Amino acid sequence: MPIIGKIKGIILRMFFGDHPPPHFHATNDEKNGLFKIDDSKMFKGNLSSKDQKKLSKWAKPRKKKLKKMWDTQDIHEIE
C-alpha cells in the first residue's frame, strides 16, 4: 500500500482498487482510521480526536489531489 504522506508519526496510505467511498488510511502506532476524501472525516477507526483534527486539516486543502489519485490510481506521496 503506497504511502501518500506522513504527519507527526501518522502514516497515510491509499490502496490500489480499494472499496468505496473514496478514502485514505491513517495509522499511528496501533491505532488507525479511514478518512473520506469528500469531507475529510474519519468514518471508521479508533484514532484520537486530536489526530482526526490534524488529518482533516491536512486533507482539506489536498482534496483535489487526493480525489485525482483515487480516480486515476496514480498514487504517490504528496506534501
Image: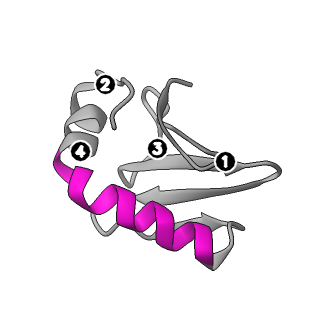
Q: Can residue 37 be seen in this view?
A: no
Q: Which of 3 and 50 is in front in this view?
A: 50
Residue at which label 1 appears: 27
Q: Do the residues labelled 3 and 1 touch (CB within 8 Å)?
A: no
Q: Do the residues labelled 3 and 4 touch (CB within 8 Å)?
A: no
Disc 1 residue crowd, few under 14, some 14–19, many 20+, Cα 10 Å:
some
Give the magenta range.
50-64
Mark 4 vs mark 1: give the one in front.
1
Residue at which label 3 appears: 19
Q: Distance between the residues labelled 4 and 2?
A: 10 Å
Q: Residue at x 24, y 50 (%)?
A: 62
Q: Residue 67 carries which label?
A: 4
Q: Please identify the quadrant where the N terminus is shown.
A: top right
Q: Kindly state the secondary structure of the residue where label 4 is placed.
A: helix
| Amino acid marked by disc 4 | Lys
Q: Is residue 2 visible?
A: yes
Q: Which of 54 and 25 is in front in this view?
A: 54
Q: Which of marks 2 and 3 is nearer the N terminus?
A: 3
Q: Residue at x 72, y 68 (%)?
A: 46
**29 on left or right of 65:** right
Residue at which label 2 appears: 73
Q: Nearer the viewer, residue 63 or 79?
A: 79
Mark 2 vs mark 3: give the one in front.
2
Q: Please identify the quadrant where the C terminus is shown.
A: top left
The kind of secondary structure the magenta stretch mainly shows is helix
| Amino acid marked by disc 1 | Thr
